[in-house]
Amino acid sequence: MLVDRFGRPLLKLRVVVNDVCNFSCVFCHFEGQRPMSGVLSPEDIGFAAMVFRKLGVGDFKITGGEPLLRRDIVEVVREIDKCGPEDISMTTNGLLLERLSGPLADAGLRRVNVSLHSLRRDRYRRIMGVDALERVVRGIHMAVDSGLQVKINVVLLRENMDEVPDIINFASKLGARVQIIELMPVNDGLTIFDKMYVDVNRLVDLLMATRGARLVGTRRDLHNRPVLEVDGVRVEIVKNWNNPTFCAACTTMRLTSDGKLKTCLYRDPVVDLYPAIRARDEERLMDLIRRANSLREPRWRLEAGAGAPANRHLQ
Ligand code: SAM
C-alpha cells in the first residue's frame, strides 16, 4: 500500500472517463479538467487499474464529464473489474441509467451515485440546465431494480436547502443513501459561490434539531465524512471546503481522461501516465504512481487551519 508524506494511504482512484456532459449544472467544477490530448481506451483504463490494484488501491470511482455518454462505458467497467477490485462505483447525472443500469451491473458495477439536486421540476431544470427530472427518477428506479446500490448526491445550495428532507424521504422509499456535498468554489462553482454557498454544518444542525438526525459514524477511510442517520437513511456529509479534517483523511487521486494523475481536485495534473499506460509498461507506471503519491499534500492542513470551520460533527 502506498502512503504519502502525511501518513495518508492511497486506497481509492477516481477515474475520469470523459470531459463531455449533456447537462450544464450551474456550479460544475468540471472535476478541474482541461482539454483532452487523447482519451484512454477501456483496455488502457483496465491496465492502469490493474497496476493501481497491485499498489493497494481497491476502490474505483468512475466519473466524468458524464460517464454514461461514453459508448464503451460498459466495457470500461468490465475492464476495471478484471483487476479484482473491492468496489467499482460511478457518479452520473442518471439521464441514461434507465437503459444502462442492467448492462453496467452485469459488467461489475456495484454502486451508483446519482446527482439529484432537486425533486421539483422547475428547480431541477434551473440548477441542472435540463428538463430531465422524470427520466432521471426512472433511471434511479431501474438502477435499484438492477441490484445497484444507489446513493443520491445533493450539492447543497441556498436554493435547495429546504428540499433536503424531501430528498431523504425519496431515498428512504428506494432503500438508497444520500450524500450532501458542500459547494466547491472551482470553475462554475466559483462564479456562484458567494450567492449560493451554505456551510453544511448548518444543515446538519437543522436536521438534528428538526428531524432527529443522529451521528452514527465517521468515514475514516474517506475524508472523515460524518455519517448521519435521518429517518432510517444513511446520510454522508461532505464538508470539503476549508476543512483540514477532510484533507487529513483524503485517500484518493484522480486519473484524468487523457491519462494524467491529479493529486487533488484543487491542483493541476502532476504526473503524465499516458505514455506508460499506452506502452503497457508496468514498472514505469508504478514508478510514476509512486512519484505522484509522494507529491500528495493536503489542501488544508490541521496545523495551518487558522480558524477554519472543520467538521464539527465527528464520532
Ligand atoms: N456528470 C456526472 C454528475 O453530474 O454526477 C459526474 C461528474 S460531476 C463533476 C461529479 C459530482 O460532482 C456530481 O455529484 C456533481 O453534482 C458534483 N459537483 C459538481 N460541481 C461541484 C461543485 N462546484 N461543488 C461540489 N460538487 C460539485
Image (cartoon, rainbow, N blue to C red):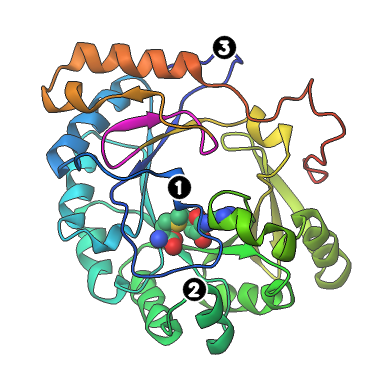
Q: Residue at x 72, y 25 (%)?
A: 301
Q: Residue at x 49, y 17 (%)?
A: 295
Picture quarter with the C terminus: top right
Q: Residue at x 70, y 65 (%)?
A: 196
Q: Amino acid at mark 2?
A: Met
Placement of 17 over or under 273, stated as above or below: below
- The boundaries of the magenta stretch are 256-266
Q: Secondary structure at mark 1?
A: helix
- For the stretch drawn in magenta, the main secondary structure is loop
Q: Secondary structure at mark 3?
A: loop
Picture quarter with the N terminus: top left
Q: Amino acid at mark 1?
A: Glu
**Which numbered disc, 3 or 1, marks the residue closer to the eye?**
1
User: Relative to 79, is 59 on the left or the right?
Assistant: right
Q: Is mark 2 within 8 Å of ligand 1?
A: yes
Question: Dot 2: within a 10 Å radius of its alpha carbon, few (fewer than 14), some, or many (20 or more) residues?
Answer: many
Q: Which residue is mark 1?
A: 31
Placement of 250 over or under 225, stated as above or below: above
